[in-house]
Image: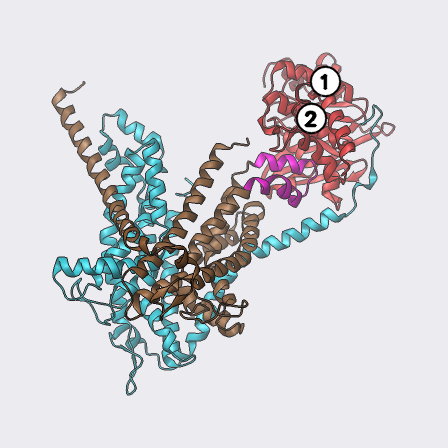
Amino acid sequence: MVAVVEPTAVNKLEVDRLTIRYGDHVALEDVSFEVRENEVFGIIGPANSGKTSFLKTINRMDMFDSNMSFEGAIRFNGVDVSRVRNVYGLRRRIGVVFPLPVGLPLSIYDNVALAPRLAGQKNRAELDIIVERCLRRAALWDEVKDRLHSLGSMLSGGQQQRLTIARALSQEPELLMLDEFSIAVDPVTTMRIEDVLRELKKEITIILVTNLVQQARRLADRTAFFLEGRCLDVAPTEELFTGTVSDPRTRDYVEGRFG
Amino acid sequence: MFEASSLNRKNLRNERLVKASLGLMTGLLILPVVLILSTLLYKGGPVISFEFLFASPTNGMTTGGIFPALLGTILLVLVALIASVPLGVAAAIYLSEYAPDNWFTRAINLAIINLAGVPSIVHALFGVGAFVIFFKFGTSILAASLTLAIMTLPVVIVATRESLQAVPQAFREACWNMGATRWQTIRRVVLPNAVTGILTGVILEVSRTSGETAPIMFTGAAFFLPLLPQGVLDQTMALSLHLFVVSTQVPDMPEELPYGVALVLISIVLIMNSLSIALRMYLRGRKKW
Amino acid sequence: MTKEKVPARQDFDQLNRDWFIDKAVQVLVFLGGISAIVFIIGIFVFISREGLGFIFGDFSFTEFFGSPNWRPTSESNPTYGILALVAGTASVTGLAMLVAIPFSLGAAIYIAEFASGKKREFLKVTVELLAAIPSVVWGFIGLAIMNPIIIQTFNVPVGLNVLNAGVILGLMAAPIMTSIAEDALKAVPDRYREAAEAMGATRWQVIYKVVLPAAKNGLLGAVLLGVGRGFGETMAVLMATGHSINIPTSVFDSVRALTATIAAELGETAVGSPHYEALFTIGIFLFVITFIINLSADLIVRGVRKG
């Protein structure tokens, strides 16, 4: 295994010998690396490599699966996520975008206003500002500004995915995790979302799980390669593609020889 | 490979025969009931009038109206609803949103099925033993309504649970990932979409409780009460019990009166059930995702 | 969100109001969830409580289950044999099933396999409405309508008998049996039907040889539920069977069912008397029997309704 935790960098996330299990089956084994503040951290690798399980453990969504357990530590802002008392507070600081777009069966306005309302925001004028800001940043405002009262669940797939991003942004998260966000979305929307991510990098930290190797190359500062439950490489993205890698399989995957 | 046409014609004839006989059986199942209902309408219709519904019985129940019985049924149903709907909705929320897939949950589901399948007279015995005697409510609206509530609890639970489970899991997961608690997710996203299901359950409960006789016979309903009930600890008359008594135990009963009572009772039940069916159809058209 | 770095907040890990409310709701709904178990146990406990006096007193196993003499009000020698009552319940339920099963099955097959679109909707709605008719109304129908018909058609003196209650009970149980049977048939995957049709089978052959065998668990469950309903029916049976306590030798005999006995006699007993307690004991018996029937039906039907 690879990465050395650099003591001088500011780490948003520290992964320390993490092993994830579903019953007896090991989904991820002995993984360690750090994700630094304000970087886009890419994770690539074929299906069933443990990428999604990894994301689930970060915001403790493993609690909803009685079969899932993990050892080792994940530290978010230095706090061990398995020791937080208010797990909802933890999840509020982290935004997630899933592979399948989800528009909640509320109005578009209420979709984006949900997180602020849960945080206690009641002032209608404030909410208006937040909703517009998040929809603009998610590149959705122009298309929906005249029908904010219509159902979010009835939008097109690409629009629902941008709505999901708007919802995530409304949490004012420190960390945004995207899990193969472009699977069910057209190429134009994908490009627009990639532009959004490039802008966001200045303010928040982003973990980008993707099966599109080129997408990682376009967006990620550093990238990890997961294969069959192990993390084989963590390196600055360009090095993964052109420089030296610790495991030859990484180069094989990146060059499309399997996956 | 493709057989001679005579064989096909025979098969086709058999097919038509089978379809016709099955259709006939279906018709025979429905027809007697239609005839019976028409008879009720024919003989009981003339009895129904404004006075019939809103006046009290006179002459030892042989003339006059059925107002106290009607009122009594409404009171019993109302109190039963108050007792059973919050409990039933809570139980359904537990089963749909919280219950893990283990033997204990299966036991709960089994209990619900049995609660629905226990004979109504056994519910009556329970009501007597528990509410009339043990809790010392005496024969009262309270005892009768609580007995009815426990009897129809399964109806509310099942209708509510089905509408909760119809909400896709993806919505819940999206909310949980945002940091919403389970209750916040239920309150803001799941429950609002289950309201029509709850309403269906309520309507069905109203329909069932209005028609029940045995559970209220010994727990709070009585046949002839000179006064209207003043509070939940009083006894009351009820439509279903009224029908039972006027058709079996009152001498010199004019023939049409029981038909009238039966017609009122069955109309209430059928209207309620039709409402719930209409609600379901309306729901089907109004897709939200 | 401004275009500055979002600050890391260490204060997110506080137990707040939402956290406590969520925990409280968890407890409340759990209480709601176990309420069904509490009530079922409660029913058994409370009816046993009232009937226990009889069980430990005048109860004799052979007399209770073996003797047809139910004479609790006799002053000299009260007897508590329920055999005749069981025969009453069994004969009425048996006749009801004889009437209901073929018609319910036929109707279920017709609705599930042959009818379509509007006609199917109409039939399903009709069946659902029929199932909703209250028991006391059926009893009234037995008294006022079936009674004269039986007397005239068969030339018998009394029309309140096994035949009357059996037919009424059959008409009562049929709609719910049709519903469940239809669900069971609909749950058979279409690919079974398509495979058979591809081999040249006619519609009826497909049903007879493929669909019915595949659905037999659900159909059996429907029958069991019908039997359970028949066993537990009170008012309709009370009003339509007449009032003779005897083991029937023909369908024109009047009988008394277990449920009807409780309903007819409870009002006239003194609380705590042996008669009163004996009636509660019949209740315990009914509870156990219907529990077993419902348990078996559920074990068989489970999974069919969800399809």
**Which residue is denoted by mark 2 in the rendering?**
A165
Query: So how many labels did they put on this image?
Result: 2
Secondary structure category for the residue under label 2: helix
The letter of the red chain is A
Q: Quadrant of the C terminus of chain C?
A: top left
Q: Colour of chain C?
A: cyan
Q: Counting residues from the N terminus, which is met first, the one under dot 2 or under dot 1?
A: 2
The letter of the brown chain is B
* Image quadrant assignment for residue A47: top right
Q: Which residues are magenta?
A: B169-194
Letter of the chain that mark 2 sits on in the rendering: A
At x 54%, y 68%, the residue is: B230
**Which residue is denoted by mark 1 in the rendering?**
A245
Callout 2–callout 1 Cβ contact below 8 Å: no
Secondary structure category for the residue under label 1: loop
Amino acid type of disc 2?
Ile
